Image (cartoon, rainbow, N blue to C red):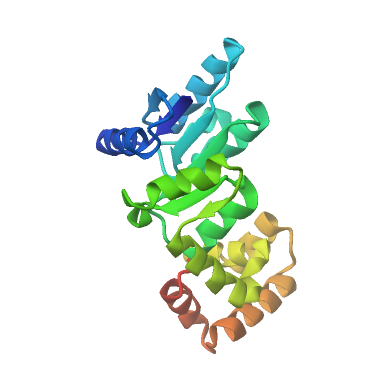
Amino acid sequence: MKTILADDHPSTLIALKAMLNSSLENKRYEFTECLSCKETYLAIENKLSENKAFDFALLDYSMPTYPEQEINNGGDLCLHLKKTMPNCKVFIITAIIDNVTLFDILQNAKPDGIALKSDLTHENFPLALEYIFKGEKYRSETVVKKLDEIWATEIFVQPSNRKILYYLSQGYRIKDMCTELDLTEGGIHKRIAKIKMALNVTDDSNILREAKKRGFV
């Protein structure tokens, strides 16, 4: 099985290889290892130039970016693989635990599997692979919990509202957000009011504190 592993920590790559080799003994893996988005992208392109494809990709979400190709994370690599190697199963692992990022990965990249690194064990890793190779979607325990949280607060299902929280956390002014979101200042103020209601806060200064506490930023 032609497998590409991508993580910017060499020790993690060693651990992932060991877990793969011990999880499904009936499969022989041919590993390609990468330490960045650029290395991963180029490895994919090299495989395509040989008229070959990867069967499985295990990608860390956060790695050094490849801005020349607008590849900023494992989600972008997942999208590229889905486009160029549609039969390749993609499993994204991440240390990021905020609800919004996890939701965006699932909504935009649509990987076959996604797990928090802290959720993976030698016991549940084989089950995750079994789900993925059978064509089912795998979501680790913490991912499922966080998705339940964001769906319970329906206001954050809307991408523009999640972006407003992100821009607020980055110090953007309302008028700066207008261009980024293609919304009027009045429209943004209305959305912020709804966000405050969803978070049960009345003071603007408490929005980010409460959003961070609930994992939305």
Q: How many marks?
A: 0
Of the pair 60 and 202, the residue shown nearer to us = 60
Q: Tell me if residue 150 comes above or below residue 7 in the rendering.
A: below
Q: Position of residue 111 (x, y in %)?
A: 57, 45
Q: Tell me if residue 51 comes above or below residue 172 in the rendering.
A: above
Of the pair 207 and 81, the residue shown nearer to us = 81
Determine the residue positioned at 52% across, 87% down.
201
User: What residue occupies the far top of the structure in this picture?
Assistant: 50
Determine the residue positioned at 61% across, 70% down.
156
Asked whether residue 126 is in view, the answer is yes
User: What residue occupies the far front of the structure in this picture?
Assistant: 26
Of the pair 173 and 19, the residue shown nearer to us = 19
Determine the residue positioned at 59% across, 11% down.
49
Q: Position of residue 11 (x, y in %)?
A: 25, 36
**Quick check: 86 left or right of 143?**
right
Asked whether residue 172 is in view, the answer is no
Q: Tell me if residue 217 comes above or below residue 132 in the rendering.
A: below
Q: Position of residue 151 (x, y in %)?
A: 61, 72
Q: Position of residue 160 (x, y in %)?
A: 67, 63
